[in-house]
Amino acid sequence: MKQRFSTLSFSVFFLSIFILFFSCGTTSKIINEPAEEAPLIQAPETETQHKNQNHNKDTITLLFAGDIMAHSVNYYIITYEKIWRDVHDIISEPDLAFANIEAPIDTTKAASSYPNFNMTQKYVQAAVDAGFDVFSLCNNHTNDQYKSGILETIKTTQAITEYTKESFGNDIYFSGTKETADSKLSALTYNYFEANGWKILFLPITELLNRPDSSDYINFIKPDEESRKAFIKYAKEFRDAHPCDLFIISIHTSEPEYTRVITEKQNQFYMDLLEAGADVVWANHAHIIKDRKIVVDTKSKRDKIIMYANGNTISGQRTKPELTSKNPTGERDNTGDGLLYKVTLHKEKDGSIKIKKCEPIFITTYINTANEFVIKPLNQDFVDYLNDVPRTNWAKYIERRIKINKEATKDLIEWQ
């Protein structure tokens, strides 16, 4: 059973924020106190946060988010716990929740935004407290703070893991970075653990880096045909060497941002990984939501799944939502939404694995009246709340965003 308390962030950044739009981010300089010298502290005990204990060991429920980002505007909030308050129950209920940390976490340096991201320890701890269990650390921003940033990220995630285990008895997993330089596939870092009686193997990789330096300290696979074939072969051998109930591969994929297009080349790569032994391919990078595909493999008797992109879980890319547009589908508007994809799997008596339920839960980054960026469920209840406040322009905007995401993305089923 998971037991978590929210943590308070000490620092509110009192500064002028200058925002420019670029690929992958909002550019601004964050001026603040020396980065995180004080230890994490526990918030007053108001509500114990639990992971529901699943007593049925034949069933496991997983939740997959998208990119956790931190632009300047995301730090400008009273407490990071507030970011997650309205989706905490959604994230904490499944047996495992997965997310991608799209930045180094170097506590020896100040927080920073695009183009060279750096998160604070408390910002990431707030995501852990919200209910996330498993994190990929490898993506195109992993080496934004160079080799030292990668090594400090490892130290920070170890500190978060130890703090959460010692304080609440919860196991948290990070992988995707390396303590020593090694480009061999055998050096890829991963997580191999048990949850609710299921053996889980989690392997994250990135096909993109914004700069070439220190790539040997990251789970980096070049996005060319030869490298992909080598990784597919390795994935099969890796699965064989690590007996498990579920093999989950996270890919920060080499593809254009801000488009919902799924190329045949990408799809075939993911399908080849399923054929090699992966049960879940969880892809990200586009910063918007894409389709999902359930693959019913009658030969192996294992249902499998591909998520092509789950968008941004939290970011500051949508700073000026097109509230009065009749069709707000601009690049920045799409980056404000994300997908929490909830998957329930069951072990059958014959040893097969069946997907019993897939639930797409759409979320959005809302800018409240205090100009704080917080996550809200993208649903009618939120629309009703906005009408009651009243923030009618926001209510109409959210109604349009609900319609756009339901129509623009879908769950596909493929039988083999």
Image: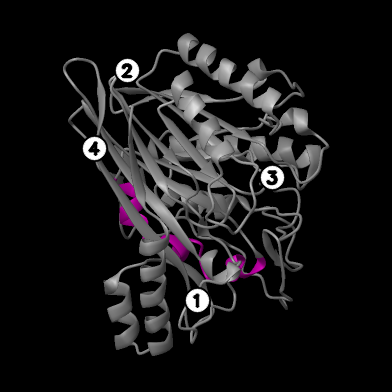
Quadrant of the snapshot with the C terminus: top left
Q: Residues within 10 Å of mark 4 (few under 14, many from 20)?
A: few
In this view, the mark in front (1 or 4): 1
Q: Residues within 10 Å of mark 1 (few under 14, many from 20)?
A: some
Mark 2–mark 3 distance (CA, rounded to whole Å): 34 Å
Give, as a three-letter code, the residue at label 2: Ser
Q: Relative to residue 354, is residue 227 drawn left or right?
A: right
Q: Which residue is mark 2?
A: 300
In this view, the mark in front (2 or 3): 2
The residues colored magenta run 72-93
Q: Is residue 141 above or below residue 383?
A: above
**Is residue 337 among the parts visible in the rendering?**
yes
Q: Which residue is mark 4?
A: 53
Query: Which numbered disc flags the more N-terminal residue, 2 or 1?
Result: 2
Magenta stretch: includes residue 92? yes
Q: Which residue is mark 1?
A: 328
Query: Which numbered disc flags the more N-terminal residue, 2 or 4?
Result: 4
Q: Is residue 248 above or below residue 146?
A: above
Mark 1–mark 4 distance (CA, rounded to whole Å): 40 Å
Query: Which numbered disc flags the more N-terminal residue, 1 or 3?
Result: 3
Asked where in the image residue 132 lies, by quadrant, the reply is top left
Image location of residue 3, percent across then percent down? 33, 43
Give, as a three-letter code, the residue at label 3: Asn
